[in-house]
Image (cartoon, rainbow, N blue to C red):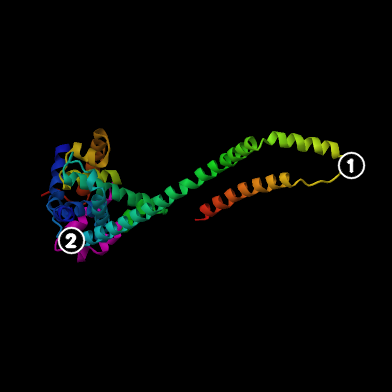
Protein backbone atom coordinates (compact mmCIF):
# COMPACT_ATOMS: atom_id res chain seq x y z
CA UNK A 1 0.00 0.00 0.00
CA UNK A 2 2.90 2.33 0.82
CA UNK A 3 4.35 2.00 -2.68
CA UNK A 4 0.94 2.54 -4.27
CA UNK A 5 0.43 5.64 -2.19
CA UNK A 6 3.91 6.87 -3.06
CA UNK A 7 2.85 6.72 -6.73
CA UNK A 8 -0.35 8.63 -5.98
CA UNK A 9 1.57 11.43 -4.25
CA UNK A 10 4.06 11.62 -7.11
CA UNK A 11 1.28 11.68 -9.70
CA UNK A 12 -1.04 14.23 -8.07
CA UNK A 13 1.31 16.46 -6.09
CA UNK A 14 1.44 19.08 -8.83
CA UNK A 15 -2.33 19.79 -9.22
CA UNK A 16 -2.91 19.63 -5.45
CA UNK A 17 -0.01 21.98 -4.66
CA UNK A 18 -1.00 24.33 -7.47
CA UNK A 19 -4.59 24.46 -6.19
CA UNK A 20 -3.42 25.28 -2.67
CA UNK A 21 -0.83 27.74 -3.97
CA UNK A 22 -3.63 29.66 -5.69
CA UNK A 23 -5.91 29.51 -2.64
CA UNK A 24 -3.11 30.85 -0.43
CA UNK A 25 -2.28 33.53 -3.02
CA UNK A 26 1.20 32.25 -3.73
CA UNK A 27 2.39 31.37 -0.22
CA UNK A 28 4.52 28.40 -1.25
CA UNK A 29 5.56 27.43 2.29
CA UNK A 30 2.00 27.43 3.60
CA UNK A 31 0.60 25.71 0.51
CA UNK A 32 3.23 22.96 0.75
CA UNK A 33 2.43 22.42 4.44
CA UNK A 34 -1.27 22.20 3.60
CA UNK A 35 -0.51 19.87 0.68
CA UNK A 36 1.45 17.58 3.04
CA UNK A 37 -1.51 17.58 5.44
CA UNK A 38 -3.76 16.75 2.49
CA UNK A 39 -1.75 13.70 1.47
CA UNK A 40 -1.32 12.48 5.05
CA UNK A 41 -5.11 12.71 5.53
CA UNK A 42 -5.62 10.95 2.23
CA UNK A 43 -3.32 8.14 3.37
CA UNK A 44 -5.10 7.78 6.71
CA UNK A 45 -8.50 7.64 4.96
CA UNK A 46 -7.36 5.69 1.93
CA UNK A 47 -9.69 2.82 2.83
CA UNK A 48 -12.70 5.12 2.57
CA UNK A 49 -11.93 6.03 -1.06
CA UNK A 50 -14.48 4.05 -3.06
CA UNK A 51 -13.54 5.27 -6.51
CA UNK A 52 -16.83 7.12 -7.04
CA UNK A 53 -14.84 10.09 -8.29
CA UNK A 54 -11.34 10.29 -9.76
CA UNK A 55 -8.42 10.20 -7.31
CA UNK A 56 -7.61 13.79 -8.25
CA UNK A 57 -11.13 15.02 -7.42
CA UNK A 58 -10.99 13.11 -4.13
CA UNK A 59 -7.62 14.70 -3.29
CA UNK A 60 -8.87 18.17 -4.28
CA UNK A 61 -11.80 17.73 -1.93
CA UNK A 62 -9.47 16.81 0.93
CA UNK A 63 -7.21 19.75 0.01
CA UNK A 64 -10.20 22.10 0.04
CA UNK A 65 -11.23 20.81 3.49
CA UNK A 66 -7.67 21.13 4.80
CA UNK A 67 -7.52 24.73 3.55
CA UNK A 68 -10.85 25.60 5.13
CA UNK A 69 -9.87 23.95 8.41
CA UNK A 70 -6.77 26.15 8.33
CA UNK A 71 -8.91 29.25 7.65
CA UNK A 72 -11.26 28.36 10.50
CA UNK A 73 -8.29 27.87 12.80
CA UNK A 74 -6.92 31.25 11.79
CA UNK A 75 -10.30 32.87 12.43
CA UNK A 76 -10.43 31.10 15.75
CA UNK A 77 -7.11 32.71 16.62
CA UNK A 78 -8.77 36.08 16.01
CA UNK A 79 -7.00 36.61 12.71
CA UNK A 80 -9.43 37.86 10.12
CA UNK A 81 -8.94 36.09 6.80
CA UNK A 82 -8.99 39.51 5.19
CA UNK A 83 -5.81 40.36 7.11
CA UNK A 84 -4.31 37.01 6.15
CA UNK A 85 -5.13 37.75 2.54
CA UNK A 86 -3.38 41.08 2.85
CA UNK A 87 -0.39 39.35 4.46
CA UNK A 88 -0.40 36.73 1.73
CA UNK A 89 -0.59 39.42 -0.91
CA UNK A 90 2.24 41.34 0.74
CA UNK A 91 4.35 38.18 0.96
CA UNK A 92 3.57 37.48 -2.65
CA UNK A 93 4.61 40.97 -3.66
CA UNK A 94 7.70 40.85 -1.46
CA UNK A 95 8.89 37.54 -2.90
CA UNK A 96 7.71 38.08 -6.43
CA UNK A 97 11.18 38.66 -7.78
CA UNK A 98 12.53 35.39 -6.36
CA UNK A 99 9.80 33.04 -7.55
CA UNK A 100 10.51 31.90 -11.12
CA UNK A 101 11.23 33.48 -14.49
CA UNK A 102 7.46 34.01 -14.79
CA UNK A 103 7.16 35.49 -11.32
CA UNK A 104 5.70 38.85 -12.44
CA UNK A 105 2.94 36.99 -14.25
CA UNK A 106 2.26 34.85 -11.17
CA UNK A 107 2.21 37.93 -9.02
CA UNK A 108 -0.49 39.35 -11.31
CA UNK A 109 -2.53 36.16 -11.00
CA UNK A 110 -2.28 36.13 -7.21
CA UNK A 111 -3.03 39.84 -7.01
CA UNK A 112 -6.09 39.32 -9.17
CA UNK A 113 -7.23 36.32 -7.07
CA UNK A 114 -6.73 38.38 -3.91
CA UNK A 115 -9.63 40.69 -4.79
CA UNK A 116 -12.04 37.76 -4.58
CA UNK A 117 -13.82 36.32 -1.58
CA UNK A 118 -12.65 32.87 -0.45
CA UNK A 119 -15.53 30.97 -2.04
CA UNK A 120 -15.30 32.93 -5.29
CA UNK A 121 -11.54 32.32 -5.43
CA UNK A 122 -12.02 28.60 -4.83
CA UNK A 123 -14.62 28.27 -7.59
CA UNK A 124 -12.67 30.44 -10.05
CA UNK A 125 -9.43 28.54 -9.35
CA UNK A 126 -11.11 25.18 -9.78
CA UNK A 127 -12.76 26.16 -13.06
CA UNK A 128 -10.31 28.46 -14.82
CA UNK A 129 -7.00 26.99 -13.60
CA UNK A 130 -7.76 23.37 -12.71
CA UNK A 131 -10.37 22.89 -15.43
CA UNK A 132 -13.24 21.39 -13.42
CA UNK A 133 -16.85 21.75 -14.53
CA UNK A 134 -19.58 23.07 -12.24
CA UNK A 135 -20.76 19.62 -11.12
CA UNK A 136 -17.21 18.61 -10.09
CA UNK A 137 -16.67 21.93 -8.27
CA UNK A 138 -19.92 21.32 -6.39
CA UNK A 139 -18.67 17.85 -5.39
CA UNK A 140 -15.29 19.16 -4.25
CA UNK A 141 -16.64 22.11 -2.26
CA UNK A 142 -19.92 20.44 -1.19
CA UNK A 143 -21.78 23.54 -2.41
CA UNK A 144 -24.97 23.44 -4.45
CA UNK A 145 -24.46 23.86 -8.18
CA UNK A 146 -26.50 27.08 -8.11
CA UNK A 147 -24.20 28.48 -5.42
CA UNK A 148 -21.13 27.55 -7.46
CA UNK A 149 -22.62 29.26 -10.51
CA UNK A 150 -23.30 32.48 -8.61
CA UNK A 151 -19.78 32.49 -7.09
CA UNK A 152 -18.34 31.98 -10.56
CA UNK A 153 -20.49 34.69 -12.07
CA UNK A 154 -19.67 37.27 -9.39
CA UNK A 155 -15.99 36.32 -9.34
CA UNK A 156 -15.62 36.55 -13.12
CA UNK A 157 -17.34 39.91 -13.19
CA UNK A 158 -15.02 41.26 -10.49
CA UNK A 159 -11.92 39.82 -12.14
CA UNK A 160 -12.79 41.09 -15.62
CA UNK A 161 -13.42 44.58 -14.26
CA UNK A 162 -10.18 44.44 -12.28
CA UNK A 163 -8.14 43.31 -15.29
CA UNK A 164 -9.63 45.94 -17.61
CA UNK A 165 -9.14 48.60 -14.97
CA UNK A 166 -5.46 47.60 -14.80
CA UNK A 167 -4.99 47.74 -18.56
CA UNK A 168 -5.16 44.01 -19.37
CA UNK A 169 -7.26 43.47 -22.47
CA UNK A 170 -6.20 39.93 -23.32
CA UNK A 171 -4.17 40.82 -26.42
CA UNK B 1 -20.08 40.95 -22.46
CA UNK B 2 -20.08 37.62 -20.59
CA UNK B 3 -18.32 35.93 -23.49
CA UNK B 4 -15.76 38.74 -23.57
CA UNK B 5 -15.15 38.29 -19.85
CA UNK B 6 -14.86 34.55 -20.31
CA UNK B 7 -12.31 34.91 -23.12
CA UNK B 8 -10.35 37.52 -21.18
CA UNK B 9 -10.16 35.34 -18.07
CA UNK B 10 -9.33 32.17 -20.01
CA UNK B 11 -6.44 34.03 -21.56
CA UNK B 12 -5.31 35.57 -18.28
CA UNK B 13 -5.27 32.23 -16.47
CA UNK B 14 -3.97 30.14 -19.38
CA UNK B 15 -0.37 30.16 -18.17
CA UNK B 16 -1.40 29.41 -14.58
CA UNK B 17 -3.53 26.52 -15.88
CA UNK B 18 -0.52 24.95 -17.57
CA UNK B 19 1.79 25.43 -14.61
CA UNK B 20 3.42 22.20 -13.42
CA UNK B 21 5.05 22.13 -10.01
CA UNK B 22 8.22 20.05 -9.81
CA UNK B 23 8.32 17.43 -7.05
CA UNK B 24 11.65 18.61 -5.53
CA UNK B 25 11.51 16.07 -2.72
CA UNK B 26 7.87 16.76 -1.84
CA UNK B 27 6.83 13.11 -2.23
CA UNK B 28 9.70 11.98 -0.01
CA UNK B 29 8.70 14.48 2.68
CA UNK B 30 5.08 13.34 2.51
CA UNK B 31 6.08 9.67 2.78
CA UNK B 32 8.28 10.51 5.80
CA UNK B 33 5.30 12.15 7.47
CA UNK B 34 3.07 9.24 6.50
CA UNK B 35 5.55 6.86 8.17
CA UNK B 36 5.62 9.03 11.30
CA UNK B 37 1.80 9.24 11.36
CA UNK B 38 1.56 5.47 10.90
CA UNK B 39 3.99 4.87 13.77
CA UNK B 40 2.03 7.28 15.94
CA UNK B 41 -1.23 5.64 14.95
CA UNK B 42 -0.01 2.14 15.79
CA UNK B 43 1.36 3.44 19.11
CA UNK B 44 -2.03 5.02 19.84
CA UNK B 45 -3.72 1.76 18.89
CA UNK B 46 -1.46 -0.15 21.31
CA UNK B 47 -2.28 2.33 24.09
CA UNK B 48 -5.99 2.02 23.32
CA UNK B 49 -5.71 -1.77 23.29
CA UNK B 50 -3.99 -1.75 26.70
CA UNK B 51 -6.65 0.59 28.03
CA UNK B 52 -9.39 -1.68 26.69
CA UNK B 53 -7.77 -4.68 28.37
CA UNK B 54 -7.55 -2.81 31.67
CA UNK B 55 -11.18 -1.76 31.28
CA UNK B 56 -12.18 -5.39 30.70
CA UNK B 57 -10.32 -6.41 33.87
CA UNK B 58 -11.85 -3.62 35.89
CA UNK B 59 -15.28 -4.52 34.52
CA UNK B 60 -15.16 -7.50 36.91
CA UNK B 61 -14.78 -5.22 39.91
CA UNK B 62 -18.32 -3.72 39.99
CA UNK B 63 -19.68 -7.19 39.21
CA UNK B 64 -17.78 -8.59 42.21
CA UNK B 65 -19.04 -5.76 44.41
CA UNK B 66 -22.59 -6.34 43.27
CA UNK B 67 -22.40 -10.09 43.87
CA UNK B 68 -20.64 -9.98 47.25
CA UNK B 69 -23.55 -8.47 49.17
CA UNK B 70 -26.16 -11.00 47.95
CA UNK B 71 -23.61 -13.75 48.64
CA UNK B 72 -23.24 -12.59 52.25
CA UNK B 73 -27.01 -12.39 52.64
CA UNK B 74 -27.39 -15.89 51.16
CA UNK B 75 -24.74 -17.34 53.51
CA UNK B 76 -26.45 -15.68 56.44
CA UNK B 77 -29.84 -17.04 55.37
CA UNK B 78 -28.48 -20.61 54.97
CA UNK B 79 -26.77 -20.52 58.37
CA UNK B 80 -29.92 -19.06 59.91
CA UNK B 81 -31.96 -22.00 58.57
CA UNK B 82 -29.34 -24.72 59.29
CA UNK B 83 -28.83 -23.64 62.90
CA UNK B 84 -32.52 -22.79 63.38
CA UNK B 85 -31.67 -19.25 64.13
CA UNK B 86 -35.23 -18.27 64.94
CA UNK B 87 -35.22 -20.74 67.86
CA UNK B 88 -32.00 -19.31 69.19
CA UNK B 89 -33.35 -15.79 68.79
CA UNK B 90 -36.58 -16.75 70.57
CA UNK B 91 -34.64 -18.37 73.45
CA UNK B 92 -32.26 -15.45 73.65
CA UNK B 93 -35.15 -12.99 73.57
CA UNK B 94 -36.99 -14.91 76.30
CA UNK B 95 -33.88 -15.13 78.48
CA UNK B 96 -33.16 -11.49 77.86
CA UNK B 97 -36.67 -10.42 78.84
CA UNK B 98 -36.75 -12.67 81.90
CA UNK B 99 -33.37 -11.67 83.17
CA UNK B 100 -33.61 -8.05 82.16
CA UNK B 101 -34.59 -6.83 85.56
CA UNK B 102 -32.09 -8.99 87.44
CA UNK B 103 -29.16 -8.85 85.00
CA UNK B 104 -28.79 -5.40 83.41
CA UNK B 105 -25.73 -6.32 81.32
CA UNK B 106 -25.04 -9.73 79.72
CA UNK B 107 -22.83 -10.83 76.83
CA UNK B 108 -23.84 -13.96 74.98
CA UNK B 109 -20.86 -15.64 73.31
CA UNK B 110 -22.89 -17.09 70.44
CA UNK B 111 -24.49 -13.74 69.60
CA UNK B 112 -21.15 -12.00 69.80
CA UNK B 113 -19.64 -14.63 67.48
CA UNK B 114 -22.50 -14.14 64.97
CA UNK B 115 -22.03 -10.38 64.89
CA UNK B 116 -18.23 -10.64 64.52
CA UNK B 117 -18.57 -13.28 61.81
CA UNK B 118 -21.02 -11.09 59.85
CA UNK B 119 -18.83 -8.04 60.17
CA UNK B 120 -15.76 -10.02 59.05
CA UNK B 121 -17.61 -11.39 56.03
CA UNK B 122 -18.78 -7.94 54.86
CA UNK B 123 -15.44 -6.28 55.75
CA UNK B 124 -13.42 -8.82 53.78
CA UNK B 125 -15.58 -8.18 50.76
CA UNK B 126 -15.01 -4.42 51.05
CA UNK B 127 -11.23 -4.86 51.39
CA UNK B 128 -11.08 -7.10 48.32
CA UNK B 129 -13.21 -4.62 46.31
CA UNK B 130 -11.00 -1.66 47.21
CA UNK B 131 -7.83 -3.61 46.35
CA UNK B 132 -9.19 -4.44 42.90
CA UNK B 133 -10.23 -0.81 42.36
CA UNK B 134 -6.72 0.42 43.30
CA UNK B 135 -5.19 -1.80 40.59
Chain letter belonging to callout 2: A
B15 relative to A158 in the view: left or right: left
Q: How many callouts does the rendering have?
A: 2
Cα–Cα span, label 2 and label 1: 115 Å
Q: Is mark 2 on a helix, strand or loop?
A: helix
Q: What element carries label 1?
A: loop
In front: mark 2 or mark 1?
1
Identify the residue at image location x=23%, y=36%: A149
Rendering coords of residue B73 (x, y %): 60, 39
From the image, give the main secondary structure of the stretch colored magenta. helix
Confirm whether residue B110 shows in the render: yes
Circle 1: is it few (<14), some (14-19), or many (20+) Cα within 10 Å?
A: few
Identify the residue at image location x=85%, y=36%: B98
Task: Tell me which corner region of the image, top left, top right, bottom left or bottom right, holds residue A136.
Answer: top left
Residue closest to the eye, A145 or A97: A145
Rendering coords of residue A67 (x, y %): 29, 50
Chain letter belonging to callout 1: B
Residue located beneath label 2 in the image: A103
B9 relative to B107 in the view: left or right: left
Callout 2 and callout 1 share a chain = no
Task: Tell me which corner region of the image, top left, top right, bottom left or bottom right, holds residue B19.
Answer: bottom left
Rendering coords of residue A130 (x, y %): 16, 47
| Residue A98 on the magenta segment | yes
Confirm whether residue A117 shows in the render: no
Residue located beneath label 1 in the image: B102
Task: Tell me which corner region of the image, top left, top right, bottom left or bottom right, holds residue B65.
Answer: top right
Residue closest to the eye, A14 or B71: B71
Residue closest to the eye, B8 or A139: A139
Circle 2: is it few (<14), some (14-19), or many (20+) Cα within 10 Å?
A: some
Whether residues under marks 2 and 1 lie with C-beta atoms below 8 angstroms apart, the answer is no
Numbered range of the magenta stretch: A88-117
Amino acid sequence: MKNAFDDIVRQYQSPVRRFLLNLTLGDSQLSDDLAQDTFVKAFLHYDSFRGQSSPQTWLMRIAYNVFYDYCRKMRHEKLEMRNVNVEMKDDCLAHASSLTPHSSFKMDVYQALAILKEDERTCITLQLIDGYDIAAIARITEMKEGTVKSHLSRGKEKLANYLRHNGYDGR
Amino acid sequence: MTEDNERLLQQFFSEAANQQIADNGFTARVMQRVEAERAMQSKAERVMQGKAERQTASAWQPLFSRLWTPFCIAVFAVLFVVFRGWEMLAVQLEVMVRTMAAQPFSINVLMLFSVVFGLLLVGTGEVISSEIARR
